Image: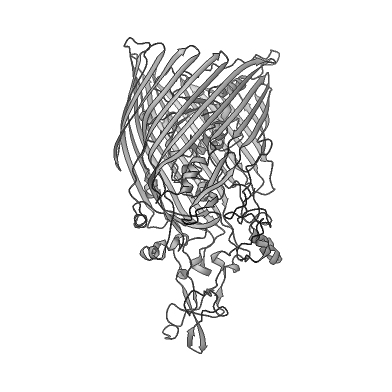
Amino acid sequence: MSATALTLVMAADAAEAAQPAPPGQPVKATVPVNPDEIVITGTRRSDRTVTTSASPIDVISSAEIKNQPTANLLDTVKNIVPSFYVPQNTISDASSFVRSPSLRGLPGDEVLVQINGKRFNRSALVQVYTGGDTALSFGSQSPDISAIPSIAIKNLQVLRDGATAQYGSDAIGGVMNFGLRNDRGGIEAQARYGQFFDHGHTKLDSGKSRQLSAATSVGFGATGFIDVAGEWYKDDGTSTGKTRPIAVIFAQDNPGLANQLPNFPLPVQIWGNSPTHGWKGVVNAGVDMSSNSQLYATLLGAYNKADESFNFRSPISAPATDPRTQDVNGVGHNLSANGAFRFPFFLTPCPAGNATCPAGGFVNDSNTFLFTELYPAGFTPRFIGVTKERWGVVGWRGHDDSGLTWDVSATRARNSLRLSMNHSLSPTFGPATQTSFQFGTLSQKETNANLDMTYPVNLGLASPVTLAWGAEYRNERYGSTAGDLQSYGAGPFAAPQPLFDETSPGVFSPTPNTAGTCPAFDPTAGPNCVIPGRAPGASGYGGTSPTYAGAWHDWSWGIYGDVEADVTNALSMGVAGRYENYQSFGGSFVYKVNALYKISPAISARGTIGTGFHAPSPGQSHDAILTTNFVAGEQVQTGTYPVDSPISRAFGSTTLGPEKSHNYGAGLILKPAGTVTITADGYIIKVKDRIGVSRTFSVTPAALAAHPELAAVGLGGDVNFFTNGFDTSTKGLDVVGTWRHNMFDGTLTATLAYNYNKSKVTKFDPGVISNAQRVDIAHLAPNHRATLSGNFVRGPWMLNARENYYGWWKDLQDYPTVQDPVTKEFLDGQKFGSKFTTDLDLSYTFMEHFTATVGAVNIFNTHPDKIAQSAFNPIYKLTGSTADGQVYPRLGGPFGLNGGLWYVRLRVKY
């Protein structure tokens, strides 16, 4: 639900209206905006409002959106809408570049996103990173709303109700419709600068945030318009952790090399925001074709580049007997060197045709190579993600004298994510390794064609019956290109290196596997010394191989019908049905029935029942990617393979089918006084056959022998795949109370918003869905979230204050605390406590067109609880952090781990 509901529309619009009068004239008192804001989402009628809608809907104004001190629209919406959750995502592989949100506890691809009522395309990234960062949207492929510039938005309408019967696949959890500006004149520009309270002084940790945005519009004809809006931003990184204990030990033991540690003198790996910059632009236009029809077009483009810290690769080890490896309980831990540094590469092959030194063997001499020659103090890869968004729609809409309306449109879109890395290496290529890699480009292309029509019929009811019908064609294509050979392939050192000593000229004997003679001594191995083969691919991430590169598509068509009317002056009802047919799995029919009954002028009741579905995307069926995940603090290489690949089939995958849902909602609308509005809406959402990523399966010697391509994951690494593996039930309650009052020669608007949301896995296959996944679905996002906000406008002054409450939450995947001694499955995770944060800003308008604002988010610099000491996540005395330098939970929890942010903003509007 939205903290603004209908009143932040009023508060923000009132503030925008609070421009001082021209010199010499008195300032006009601000009049509260009509609370019955017209809505177009969730209904085909043109006379529905927030408080007369049979489905709960919130309208967030452009002013409220633009006033948020964030360049990323994900964070903007998170600050405003209590049931909208998105983690911070630090060191989360590609999921740091495209963060997938959750609405009402459901994943991002179970929420339909629209721009001007037209479907917005999915991101190219399928969320396969394993951890709390993605737990609520694990396996989803959702739109990336961060590509939309805030200044271009007229309003955001959030339908808190299932709407698949009205809009098609994905609208299980609701609809977010971003309406763009359609002004016919004027210009607006604003500049913002801010910085986190806790900050350093470099690009990696200064916490600085910069944003420039502008919009202008021109009107022509009776209703024609063209609006152009753009935004540029640049955010430096933040650092909230400590350096790794092994890095401190390295610096103490090798003081001459300490300044060669990555990021010196900062932590060797950085937990926080990644340095990011980019731009976004929108053109929205309409041209009159006649007195009752208009040709319209919208174009959107965006570019974002982020530079993410990866995990430090240490060149040294430290044994548990070293007191510097002790945790806060005095227990020592083994800190291991990265595998790339463990053994030397022997470069002299056995002489050709020598019977005592066979082919494939190597001479145990001084002609060797160590990666310390390349990285004397270890290395921390930098992961680079470049996202591009292109979205466009053209259409023709109009009406005739009989009341018939039509809207014919076509949409084309493409989202891409290009992945690369520097400051890394490819171990199997030894001294010939690259240090920079291109991993390939992921892409998502979509084509939509829509016909929407309505017609009013008078049947003697309290209102005409609005008949709506239409059709839709959709085609989506997911693709991936191959990366550099060294990013995924096996070089000459993928094979083991048997060593031979030259005992006399031209005569060799196997080097014995003893502690004094074998660099890779292994008491459990055979009598001869063998250097183990290295894992193929770049260190940190695997590029796409030609085997899994390609393009896959799916297409569908659908038809729908919708009937809405006021049956009596007190009772309004609506019925909708939709049938869609997909090339991949066939057809599905869904329906929706809703009603609103006015018990009295001050009390209305509303309810909804309906079904929905979410079709598996080509990306979910064909995604192939290699990631570095963390389980209980331990680094694990994980390969996600297409469901129809031999590897996935061997571990039990099956063809994906659609998710199916049932939605139930009931609520009250109370207007006890002219300036007070209260809405309370409960909901139940049951989803069957949810699409997600399975639990991980360990790569055994038998699996490696049967599928040699698993060498990229490595023995003991993990494999997973997409599956319809579980059912969920989500129950919740949204309450919004609004009060408006004129006081102290000004206007006060206050809103109290509360959301309770609880999801539960009701059915699952324990062979593919882990307990950690089930617990995180229920508790990763707080079950309770509340916001008390106030807006006071007096003359040229405006004051905004917001108090946010976040209930407790858990992250079992990253921070387990209890393990089953037999199955070794983690049973429970750390509970992070509830918190309050406070936001405050003050604005002053001068010279009629200029507004200056100073403010702070999280003004008391609140952080989530620190990670607690446990056997699975020891906290080291040396650094006060985990082994990888974490102090606060990596995902940031519901409000992030960076703490407070101050900012100033100057706005100009003519």
Residue 857 image offset from top left, x and y in percent: 65, 35
Work out whether residue 790 or residue 71 is closer to the camera in this orientation and state it. 790
Q: Please, which colouring scheme is shown?
A: one colour
Residue 511 image offset from top left, x and y in percent: 51, 81
- Answer with left or right where residue 900 lies relative to residue 890: right
The answer to whether any part of residue 50 appears in the image is no
- Answer with left or right where residue 635 lies relative to residue 693: right
Above or below 126: residue 297: above
Above or below 138: residue 846: above
Work out whether residue 61 or residue 763 is closer to the camera in this orientation and state it. 763
Q: Quadrant of residue 398?
A: top left
Residue 22 image offset from top left, x and y in percent: 67, 16
Work out whether residue 608 or residue 629 is closer to the camera in this orientation and state it. 608
Residue 18 image offset from top left, x and y in percent: 63, 19
The answer to whether any part of residue 844 appears in the image is yes
Residue drawn at x 69%, y 13% is 26
Q: Residue furthest top?
A: 460
Above or below 738: residue 242: below
Residue drawn at x 61%, y 66% is 317
Number of on-image labels: 0
Quadrant of the image containing the C terminus: top right
Work out whether residue 698 or residue 580 is closer to the camera in this orientation and state it. 698
